[in-house]
Image (cartoon, rainbow, N blue to C red):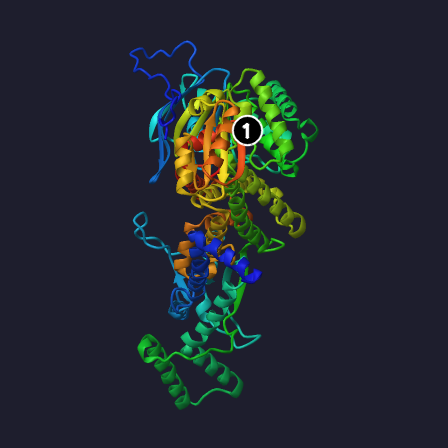
């Protein structure tokens, strides 16, 4: 499905040449993933993924549940040993002390000590990362402020609301002021208000120039937060580019027309093909460049004797891109 | 489907999916049954034997017959000298001093000293009769053994010395009714000689089914251990129950590892600068401190309420407390690293801890158990810990005497921790 897009973006990072010089480049990329493969039994969770992260960018990993996003993240963190491929973080191999120090991981699970207060949780994870004394106190204060939990600093984590726990979970991943932040679906299970609060936190990080990978299966989140978006499916990155470039690559037209008819008939099939659309059951889909094209379609359908039940005009989005690339809905 | 059936069905599915817990839920009662059956039945139908030392200072016919009768008792294991070994191929027999030392060290619960002159008056039929007392040295932590030995001693007196009893009876008869005619005296002498002859040939002697008339042998009991202790068994039980609950505590504390693995916290911690070895060491340190604090509270309570002499045994308590805490903490880490869920940990720890506690003497003293089970107790933390605490609080032994217990408990802790670390590699990476 990767290459059926007429203007498929270049998904592959520049080939990583085997260098005779072992000295790393002066400014190594925040993250370089090359040919990464991870299998669990007969299931290939990560299937030959390669990409490079640019300094200061926010990369959204968009894909349905089970696509392999979390395994990819855990491979980068060093919690999954890959079967093939390499991961380097600012030039250091994954799981090395330097890579661990550079990465801030926000796991999908609420990985907190429930009986410890918010501040105590942050102190604990700060100490795990080697902080102590004044730097630790300052880091805790910054995290509490960043997550908006200053007034709940002394509340046990288990007594916090779901949204607050999520924010604390994020703060714990940033306590050591990492240079690369990996967020694995940080908005899972939170209400819209809390989600907006989390978006604001992430945008604050972006404004500080932090490099971020953000996994989600919500396209709105990827559209709002990510500079580039990698669409992941069945363990592979099937598209990687900016939001607009992805849509432009798959949908050169400016809008989509979705027309649902009363019955699926051979006449409908012929008519759809004639106008360059695609048909699924009794719903035809077209790409148009100008709204005036819509009137032409409607007249033509009436002339063909087709009974139109519903009509929608929409701009293509990431959902459309995913559907176009995989033939499935993003939340299938 | 009614809701209660649905709930029951879900519980059943949960149990079925956790096969280890499922297996243990059926194995547990069988294993417990087997362990307790072995302890109580002695692996067969044999009665647990009491080991005693007998020192015959008299070397008379009567004392020899008594010693032999005691040796013939099924429920006694009589030693007159140390066992032959490579280091000591011809050991000298026990004397009064070495026998007392053996009781004090816990080697045997009872020693009998048959004094010189015993053969002159081996038995007595009542007050006013001359009798030589046998000295019974005992460890007062064992309330049963001295009473059993005393009873068996009376039985042996009744059955082993028929000629002596007959002679003494004739003497009393002669004293109170004016003596026998020469012909009667001749028959009495022949009968006594016949009794002596039959005793020399045990195969022709039928043993009496039961004995009665206890008290014909005069016994003077003396507790050589724990004589002045206000509550003889409290120190023992403080150690015995303490160790058992320490095992539970350590198992529970180590279980936090499983909680953290389940919640994802373990993953997050291991993604930082913390290694699995460091994490386990940290968890174990906490378990050691917790276990030692628990033991301290227990012994302070025993000191305040039951007057166990803690202040005069601080150094021994510290040594044994820390070594025991170290071993049980490592044991807890091992259990937690083996198990995949809290349910498994609960089932496995119940099985192992209860078995170890039963075999190791936390539920009742090991000296009540058959010899094989006593030996099996040496493969438990409980057994070594209780032995060590008993040395400290009961036998008043110096800290230097604790080296076997210290060596075993510390090396056990180290080995268990290393095994736990190896098993915990499964958490290192997916």
Kindly tell me whether residue A289 is visible in this rendering.
Answer: yes
A199 is higher (above) or lower (below) than B412: above
Q: Is residue B198 left or right of residue B262?
A: left
Disc 1: CA contacts within 10 A as few (<14), some (14-19) or many (>=20): few
Q: Is residue B150 left or right of residue B185?
A: right
Q: Residue B224: x percent and y percent?
A: 53, 55
Quadrant of the rendered image containing residue B70: bottom left
Kindly identify the residue that appears in the image at 45 percent across and 45 percent down.
B340
Mark 1 belongs to which subunit?
A
**Residue under the point 51% across and 78% down:** B213
Where's the C terminus of chain B, which quadrant? top left
Q: At which x and y percent is residue A303? A: 47, 35
Nearer to the camera, A26 or A271: A271
Q: Secondary structure at mark 1?
A: helix
Q: Which residue is mark 1?
A: A220
Q: Position of residue A19 (x, y in %)?
A: 30, 13
């Amino acid at each position: 499905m990767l290459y059926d897009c007429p203007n498929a973006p270049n998904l592959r990072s520049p080939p990583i040449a085997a260098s005779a010089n072992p000295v790393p480049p002066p400014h190594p990329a925040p993250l370089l993933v090359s040919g990464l493969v991870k299998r669990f039994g007969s299931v290939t969770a990560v299937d030959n993924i390669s990409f490079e992260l640019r300094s200061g960018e926010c990369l959204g990993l968009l894909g349905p549940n089970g696509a392999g996003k979390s395994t990819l993240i855990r491979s980068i963190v060093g919690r999954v040993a890959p079967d093939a491929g390499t991961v380097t973080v600012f030039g250091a191999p994954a799981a090395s002390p330097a890579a661990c120090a550079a990465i801030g991981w926000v796991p999908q699970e609420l990985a907190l000590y429930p009986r410890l207060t918010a501040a105590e949780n942050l102190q604990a994870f700060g100490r795990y990362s080697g902080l102590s004394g004044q730097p630790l106190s300052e880091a805790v204060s910054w995290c509490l402020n960043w997550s908006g939990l200053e007034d709940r600093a002394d509340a046990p984590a288990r007594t916090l609301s779901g949204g607050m726990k999520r924010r604390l979970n994020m703060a714990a991943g940033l306590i050591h002021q990492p240079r690369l932040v990996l967020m694995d679906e940080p908005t899972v299970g939170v209400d819209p208000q809390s989600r907006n609060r989390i978006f604001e936190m992430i945008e604050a990080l972006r404004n500080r120039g932090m490099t971020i990978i953000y996994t989600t299966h919500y396209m709105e989140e990827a559209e709002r937060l990510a500079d580039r978006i990698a669409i992941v499916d069945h363990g592979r990155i099937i598209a990687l580019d900016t939001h607009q470039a992805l849509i432009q690559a798959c949908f050169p037209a400016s809008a989509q027309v979705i027309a649902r008819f009363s019955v699926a008939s051979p006449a409908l099939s012929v008519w759809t093909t004639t106008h360059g659309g695609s048909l699924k059951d009794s719903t035809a889909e077209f790409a148009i460049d100008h709204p005036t094209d819509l009137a032409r379609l409607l007249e033509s359908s009436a002339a063909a004797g087709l009974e139109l039940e519903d009509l929608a005009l929409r701009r293509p989005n990431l959902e459309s891109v995913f559907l176009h690339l995989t033939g499935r809905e993003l939340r299938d | 489907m009614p809701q209660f059936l649905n709930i029951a069905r879900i519980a059943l599915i949960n149990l079925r999916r956790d096969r280890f817990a499922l297996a243990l839920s059926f194995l547990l009662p069988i294993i417990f049954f087997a362990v307790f059956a072995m302890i109580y039945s002695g692996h067969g139908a044999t009665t647990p034997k009491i080991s005693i030392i007998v020192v015959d200072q008299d070397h008379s016919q009567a004392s020899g017959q008594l010693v032999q009768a005691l040796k013939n008792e099924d429920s006694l294991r009589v030693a007159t000298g140390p066992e032959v070994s490579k280091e000591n191929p011809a050991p000298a027999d026990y004397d009064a001093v070495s026998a007392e030392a053996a009781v004090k060290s816990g080697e045997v619960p009872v020693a009998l000293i048959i004094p010189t002159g015993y053969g002159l008056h081996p038995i007595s039929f009542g007050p006013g009769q001359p009798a030589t007392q046998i000295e019974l040295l005992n460890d007062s932590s064992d309330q049963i053994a001295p009473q059993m030995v005393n009873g068996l001693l009376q039985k042996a007196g009744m059955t082993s010395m028929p000629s002596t009893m007959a002679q003494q009876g004739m003497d009393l008869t002669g004293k109170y009714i004016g003596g026998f005619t020469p012909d009667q005296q001749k028959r009495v002498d022949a009968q006594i000689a016949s009794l002596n002859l039959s005793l020399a040939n045990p195969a022709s002697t039928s043993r009496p089914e039961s004995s009665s008339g206890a008290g014909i042998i005069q016994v003077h009991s003396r507790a050589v251990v724990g004589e002045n202790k206000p509550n003889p068994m409290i120190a023992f039980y403080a150690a015995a129950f303490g160790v058992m609950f320490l095992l539970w505590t350590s198992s529970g504390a180590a279980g936090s590892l499983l909680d953290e693995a389940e919640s994802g916290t373990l993953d997050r911690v291991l993604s930082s600068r913390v290694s699995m070895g460091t994490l386990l060491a940290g968890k174990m340190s906490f378990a050691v401190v917790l276990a030692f604090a628990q033991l301290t509270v227990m012994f302070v309570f025993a000191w305040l309420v039951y007057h166990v002499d803690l202040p005069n045994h601080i150094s021994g308590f510290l040594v044994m407390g820390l070594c025991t805490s170290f071993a049980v903490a490592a044991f807890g880490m091992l259990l937690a690293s083996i198990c995949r869920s809290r349910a498994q940990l609960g089932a496995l720890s119940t099985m192992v801890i209860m078995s170890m506690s039963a075999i190791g003497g936390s539920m009742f003293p090991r000296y009540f158990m058959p010899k094989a089970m006593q030996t099996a107790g040496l493969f438990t933390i409980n057994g070594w810990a209780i032995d060590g605490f008993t040395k400290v609080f009961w036998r008043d032994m110096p800290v230097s005497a604790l080296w076997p217990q210290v060596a075993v408990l510390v090396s056990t802790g180290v080995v268990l921790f290393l095994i736990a670390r190896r098993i915990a590699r499964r958490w290192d990476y997916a």
